[in-house]
């Protein structure tokens, strides 16, 4: 099974009144869209701080766009439709939203990967490395520019 990976290239950093970076905002909105399409999503993060940041941001969506989600180790036994963590997910998930600086070792478990190319140069370089890693394992990669 091959992986379809999509890199979202952001043109701008976050708005000053936004409490999360532009790629976290896009990741949360993507998770909501995927959830509404019936997908089970795993949001992979580098650390507990990032996990809490995306978790808090998802809680702030209004009632109509609420996304059932949980941090790894919390929530129902099989996990909510959207799970956030640093370890491989317990249940089967079709889509990985990568907010970490690297591709997880368990990336082959997913059919689809969403990744982000932020504006900041250090983050952009890390995204190039992830792109190379995914290409090396034979992922079908596409890019989409985002005028955020």
Image (cartoon, rainbow, N blue to C red):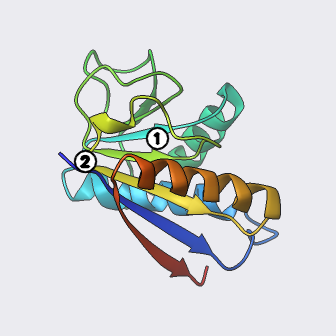
Dot 2: what SS? loop
Check the image and report above or below for 8 versus 98. below
Distance in Å between CA atoms under marks 1 and 2: 14 Å
Q: Quadrant of the N terminus?
A: top left
Q: Residue furthest bottom?
A: 147
**Which of disc 2 and disc 1 is earlier in sequence?**
1
Residue in the image at 67% along x and 80% along y:
11
Residue in the image at 47% along x and 77% along y:
144
Check the image and report above or below for 117 versus 111. below
| Residue bearing the label numbered 1 | 43
Label 1 Cα crowd, 10 Å radius (few <14 / some 14-19 / many 20+): many
Q: Residue furthest front?
A: 136
Give left or right: position of 20 versus 24: right
Label 2 Cα crowd, 10 Å radius (few <14 / some 14-19 / many 20+): some
Give left or right: position of 121 versus 114: right
| Residue bearing the label numbered 2 | 111
Q: Quadrant of the C terminus?
A: bottom right
Residue 13 sits in quarter = bottom right
Instruction: Choose between 138 and 22: the one closer to the eye.
Output: 138
């Amino acid at each position: 099974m091959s992986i379809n990976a999509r890199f979202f290239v952001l043109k701008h950093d976050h708005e000053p009144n936004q409490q999360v970076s532009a790629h976290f905002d896009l990741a949360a909105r993507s998770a909501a869209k995927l959830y509404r399409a019936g997908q089970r999503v795993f949001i992979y993060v580098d650390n507990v701080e990032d996990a809490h940041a995306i978790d808090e941001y998802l809680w702030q969506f209004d009632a109509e766009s609420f996304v059932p989600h949980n941090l790894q180790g919390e929530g129902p036994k099989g996990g909510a439709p959207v799970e956030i963590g640093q370890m491989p997910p317990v249940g089967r998930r079709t889509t990985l939203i990568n907010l970490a600086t690297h591709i997880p070792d368990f990336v082959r478990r997913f059919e689809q990967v969403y990744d982000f190319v932020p504006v900041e140069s250090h983050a952009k370089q890390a995204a190039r490395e992830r792109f190379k890693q995914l290409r090396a394992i034979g992922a079908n990669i596409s890019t989409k520019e985002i005028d955020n």
